[in-house]
Image (cartoon, helix red, strand yellow):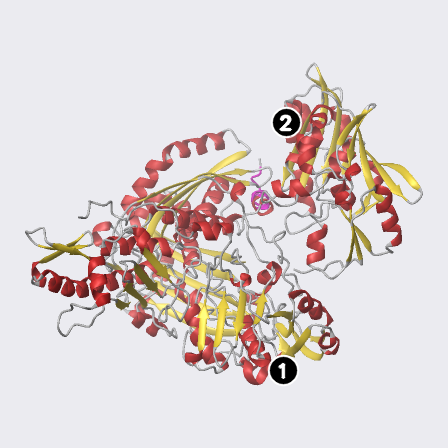
């Protein structure tokens, strides 16, 4: 008989995956080796913009151990153009993005040739032996300069560096009033104010822990691709489309993958080039990047200029928001490059009931590494801008920034709520999260200390920063993606196989790269089917094992993929019920399923699901006309996004003599709906906070005037370590999502989205009395010190 | 991240090392702890024909007392310097500075002598070596010679070491009973110093009797803050006196601007951090 078991969902289990991931004794792509494996290395342009002249490959070709050197021109008949899954509008021309540049390089890091050799060291030596003549062209690096008349053109065939203009207007969409009119009215109204600010989202580098790596085996007419990717299923389809391979001959395996943060939500040039080389040479080929190659050539993130205009009554009621966004695409489009800033369009209004909203987006090409998704992808940028604006508006109005937010946010009783950007938020309780955060933070005590420090002109000033964020995640309802012009749906697939011995295999189309899906999915299935946690094995990442899926990004895995698992499990139970009824000689309606056992109501007769699985395996005694299988699969397409939210409060000390910022206290209360595994959630929140704080204080990818990346190693690209980050106080409120049976929302990006404005708001708040009202990110000591100094208020 | 091919020699005595270096030609390179050289090789910013690894030379490791001073073998790791009781007793400043070098992994590999011979102006150990009047014992084909720290550091990555010479020992006078503090300013914990201030003082009845102050990354070589030292000596260690003395910290400096700090900010940091370092040292 089954004993009462503690439910798995809700348990803070350590990851099943921990032992192999933490020790590294596992199948990373670079650990793969195959008989006859060759090694590929890339020749990259050191010049940001140039016509390619003669490429002399003779010396390299003649080196012992070198099998081939291919230039972009050599490969051009086969190499195709890199896929873009997200055009903003159908009539815009997408410029060609060749895996290897053919006649022109457009950023420092563009591939001009590849070398294939018997070992990695020889390949690396041969790269130095390839001699390329570059005929330099003028570079354009700054977005505003790129839009000026006569600017050098990244893609001359477009006639401009401005790729597209996209606008959302709530008056046109019927979701609100006319923003421009409301702003004009406010300008004319003595009881209103209009506040304008420009914010800059610096360029960031995802900097995943495991560099990118790909191994391609072209045995027979199959092509097997191992890749350190977030998106094996998308890679399979896109590799087929890009290179003209028959999709049924392509198998993609994402073995254990060491982080991605959106940086591996990409179909890469290097994947295509490795496939081409393997096919040409008919030998398996591996490419693994170095860290500096990764920083240079894997896609970057952010890099936007945000011109914000907000209008409000003097009582704090916001009457209109207008956002004019410029987004740096870099030199080419990656898979979702133009979708990232567009995604933010729906988030600038955040948790607020703004009556009028207009969003304008200009995408710009420059001679820099292309940008694409980085943790949050469009939403951190939007959240930063609006949460900074709310603090600035509060300062202008002389009101408390929390009270200003509360005056404008959606009240918990008003859900579901359709926003001015047209999204319907299913649930939320901003009051509850904020109240809990305040309890943990000692807001009043810190405000008192702030006043005291100001009064005694302490060199260490204290600031309090607030971020009451929401985000849209759980990508995504397929029909919505279709309306946005995204080239794929947003469903997710799961299948469950009941083995003869009563064990369970769960196949998921999501593709974990550190999140802990194997653990969380096991917990879900263990509860649903009433089987031990240890008996559940989660399979993923290999398109032959998990043939259907749309992978992992946008905090979608649980809210979409997890629901597919639930639905598949429910189908297993339904199928098993028929078999159980037959075995128990009872009517299906007389059975109740609980704790893994079908029991005949009111009797002690019953059969476990494992017994049903074995009876199905033997099929000796099976109900007439019933298929001898209780395996099931399910493809789940969500009806809506999910909308996690939370209140983050940061207390930061600013050393006014040195500009150094120290986070003294960080409290976050996230509402991510129901929770499957609180320990995994905690890990996601901590990691997310670290990356968001890193944007606020440390990280920035920079180029010199010639277009050379000046943050090409971790000496210059400053990733914080544990020593640079505070201890976090984390807690949760729980407002279940109403759009899925688990009530879950997603947590992968919340910390990153929320924390950046909380920190910058705290820094600015600390020195506002000295005349400072903005500091550009990252708030480095020099920037903070200079801001104080130029405000004239240095003590 | 694969270096270009090179010949590798691992001598077991200083004499062998000197011979090997002399025989290896112009572009040979000496490998100490490798914490700066290996990244340079891996990124192919340098491609020496021969690497002479000092790691197997036992006589280059360890710290001993000799007369009025300490002798630190050039291949002594930061970790060993950090934990050595002679250093703690007679050269506390070196211990305080070494505490701040990079992270534990680097401190277990990196060496005291390697750091000085590399002469990166952002390296932390140059300033205390200068402030403490350390002497560098250098071995070459013609035997050994001794160079004071003030003459050893000549420019960015440039020292008095000739191409065929090896730094074998560093001799440091004893500063028994001196208090010390290193005020290091960097953007993240594992980053190089933007500015560092190494202070050691001898106090007598609440007044500064002697002071030695070295600045990290305020010029292409380490800088001695002589004006600050002079202003402190004989003065009571009051906040006001320290502040007045620290105001001289940027005198004679010529820092290189970079993305983290322009000249003006670096000089201001030097003044502020000197005040803090002296305050911490007198109360250490």
Q: Residue furthest left?
A: A602
Q: Is residue A133 above or below residue A611?
A: below
Q: State the mark number for residue A25.
A: none
Image: magenta residue range: A785-794
* Residue pointed to by mark 1: A73
**Residue at 45%, 68% in the rendered image:** A253
Q: Secondary structure at mark 2?
A: helix
Res A63 quadrant in image: bottom right
Q: Position of residue B214 (x, y in %)?
A: 74, 34
Q: Chain of mark 1?
A: A
**Residue at 58%, 60% in the rendered image:** A295
Q: Position of residue B149 (x, y in %)?
A: 82, 36
- Nearer to the camera, A621 or A309: A621
Q: Is residue B79 above or below residue A426?
A: above
Q: Position of residue A302 (x, y in %)?
A: 49, 60
Q: State the mark number for residue B280.
A: 2
- Nearer to the camera, A331 or A234: A234
**Residue at 41%, 62% in the rendered image:** A323
Q: Residue furthest bottom?
A: A77
Does A197 lie within the magenta span?
no
Q: Quadrant of the N terminus of chain B?
A: bottom right
**Position of A71 compared to B61: left or right?**
left
**Position of A706 compared to A199: left or right?**
right
């Amino acid at each position: 008989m089954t004993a009462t078991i503690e439910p798995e969902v809700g348990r803070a289990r350590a990851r099943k995956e921990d032992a192999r991931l933490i020790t590294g004794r596992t199948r990373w792509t670079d650990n793969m080796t195959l008989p006859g494996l060759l090694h590929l290395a890339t020749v990259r342009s050191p010049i940001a913009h140039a016509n390619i002249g003669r490429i002399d490959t003779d010396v390299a070709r003649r080196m012992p151990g070198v099998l081939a050197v291919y230039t972009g021109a050599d490969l051009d008949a086969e190499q195709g153009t890199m896929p873009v899954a997200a055009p903003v509008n159908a009539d815009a021309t997408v410029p060609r993005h060749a895996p290897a540049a053919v006649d022109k390089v457009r950023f420092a890091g563009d591939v001009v040739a590849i070398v294939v050799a018997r070992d990695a060291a020889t390949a690396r030596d041969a790269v130095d032996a390839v001699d390329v003549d570059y005929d330099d062209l003028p570079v354009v690096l700054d977005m505003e300069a790129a839009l000026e008349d006569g600017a050098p053109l990244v893609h001359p065939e477009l006639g401009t560096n401005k790729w597209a203009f996209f606008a959302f207007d709530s008056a046109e969409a019927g979701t609100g009033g006319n923003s421009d009119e409301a702003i004009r009215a406010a300008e004319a109204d003595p009881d209103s104010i209009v506040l304008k600010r420009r914010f800059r989202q610096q360029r960031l580098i995802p900097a995943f822990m495991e560099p990118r790596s790909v191994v391609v085996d072209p045995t027979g007419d199959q092509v097997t691709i191992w890749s350190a990717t977030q998106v094996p299923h998308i890679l399979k389809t896109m590799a087929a489309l890009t290179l003209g391979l028959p999709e049924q001959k392509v198998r993609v395996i994402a073995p254990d993958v060491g982080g991605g943060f959106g940086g591996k939500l990409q179909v890469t040039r290097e994947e295509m080039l490795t496939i081409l080389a393997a096919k040409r040479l008919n030998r398996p080929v591996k490419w693994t990047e170095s860290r500096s190659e990764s920083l240079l050539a894997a896609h970057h993130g952010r890099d936007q200029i945000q011109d914000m205009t907000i209008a409000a009554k003097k009582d704090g009621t916001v009457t209109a928001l207008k956002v004019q966004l410029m987004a740096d695409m870099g030199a080419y489009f990656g898979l979702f490059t133009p979708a990232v800033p567009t995604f933010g369009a729906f988030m600038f209004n955040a948790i607020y009931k703004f009556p009028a909203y207009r969003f304008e987006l200009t995408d710009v090409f420059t001679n820099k590494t292309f940008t694409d998704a980085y943790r949050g992808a469009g939403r951190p940028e939007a959240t930063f801008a609006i949460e900074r604006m709310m603090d600035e508006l509060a300062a202008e109005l002389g009101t408390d920034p929390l009270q200003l937010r509360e005056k404008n946010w959606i009240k918990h009783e008003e859900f579901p709520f359709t926003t001015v950007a047209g999204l319907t938020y299913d649930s939320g309780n901003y009051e509850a999260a904020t109240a809990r955060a305040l309890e943990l933070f000692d807001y009043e005590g810190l405000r008192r200390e702030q006043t005291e420090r100001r009064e005694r002109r302490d060199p260490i000033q204290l600031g309090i920063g607030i971020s009451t964020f929401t985000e849209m995640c759980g990508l995504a309802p397929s029909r919505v993606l279709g309306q946005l012009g995204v080239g794929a749906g947003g469903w997710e697939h799961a299948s469950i196989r009941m083995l003869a011995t009563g064990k369970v295999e769960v196949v998921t189309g999501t593709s974990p790269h550190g999140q802990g899906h194997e653990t969380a999915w096991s917990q879900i299935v263990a509860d649903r089917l009433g089987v031990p946690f240890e008996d559940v094995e989660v399979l993923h990442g290999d398109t032959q094992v998990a043939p259907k899926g749309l992978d992992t990004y946008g905090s979608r895995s649980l809210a979409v993929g997890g629901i597919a698992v639930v639905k598949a499990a429910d189908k297993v139970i339904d199928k098993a019920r028929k078999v159980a009824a037959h075995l128990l000689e009872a009517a299906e309606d007389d059975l109740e399923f609980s704790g893994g056992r079908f029991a005949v109501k009111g009797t002690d007769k019953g059969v476990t699901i494992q017994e049903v699985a074995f009876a199905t395996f033997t099929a000796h005694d099976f109900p007439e006309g019933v298929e001898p299988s209780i395996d099931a699969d399910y493809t789940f397409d969500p009806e809506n996004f999910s909308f996690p939210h939370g209140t983050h409060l940061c207390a930061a000390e600013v050393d006014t003599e040195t500009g150094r910022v120290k986070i003294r206290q960080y409290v976050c209360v996230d509402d991510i709906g129901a929770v499957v595994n609180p320990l995994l959630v905690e890990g996601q929140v901590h990691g997310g906070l670290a990356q968001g704080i890193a944007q606020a204080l440390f990280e920035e990818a920079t180029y010199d005037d010639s277009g050379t990346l000046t943050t090409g190693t971790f000496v210059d690209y400053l990733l914080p370590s544990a020593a640079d980050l505070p201890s976090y106080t984390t807690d949760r409120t729980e407002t279940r999502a109403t759009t899925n049976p688990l009530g879950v929302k997603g947590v992968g990006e919340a910390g990153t989205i929320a924390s950046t404005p909380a920190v910058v708001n705290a820094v600015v708040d600390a020195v506002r009395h000295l005349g400072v009202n903005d500091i550009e990110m990252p708030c480095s000591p020099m920037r903070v010190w200079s801001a104080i100094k130029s405000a004239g208020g240095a003590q | 991240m694969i270096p270009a091919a090179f010949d590798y020699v691992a001598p077991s005595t200083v004499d062998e090392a000197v011979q090997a270096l002399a025989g290896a030609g112009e572009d040979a390179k000496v490998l100490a702890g490798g914490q700066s050289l290996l990244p340079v090789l891996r990124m192919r910013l340098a491609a020496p024909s021969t690497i002479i690894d000092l790691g197997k030379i036992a006589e280059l490791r360890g710290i001993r007392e000799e007369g009025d001073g300490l002798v630190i073998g050039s291949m002594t790791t930061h970790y060993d310097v950090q934990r050595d009781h002679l250093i703690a007793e007679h050269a506390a400043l070196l211990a305080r500075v070494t505490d701040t070098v990079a992270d534990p992994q680097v401190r277990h590999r990196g060496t005291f002598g390697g750091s000085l011979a590399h002469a990166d102006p952002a390296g932390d150990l140059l300033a205390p070596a200068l402030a403490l009047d350390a002497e560098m014992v250098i071995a070459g084909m013609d035997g050994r010679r001794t160079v004071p720290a003030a003459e050893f550091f000549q420019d960015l990555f440039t020292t008095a070491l000739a191409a065929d010479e090896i730094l074998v020992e560093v001799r440091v006078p004893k500063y028994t009973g001196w208090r010390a503090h290193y005020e290091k300013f960097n953007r993240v914990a594992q980053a190089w110093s933007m500015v560092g201030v190494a202070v050691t003082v001898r106090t007598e009845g609440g007044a500064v009797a002697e002071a030695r102050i070295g600045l990290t990354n305020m010029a292409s070589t380490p800088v001695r803050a002589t004006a600050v030292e002079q202003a402190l000596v004989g003065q009571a260690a009051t906040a006001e006196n320290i502040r007045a003395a620290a105001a001289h910290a940027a005198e004679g400096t010529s820092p290189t601007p970079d993305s983290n700090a322009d000249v003006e900010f670096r000089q201001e940091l030097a003044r502020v951090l000197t005040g803090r370092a002296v305050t911490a040292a007198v109360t250490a």
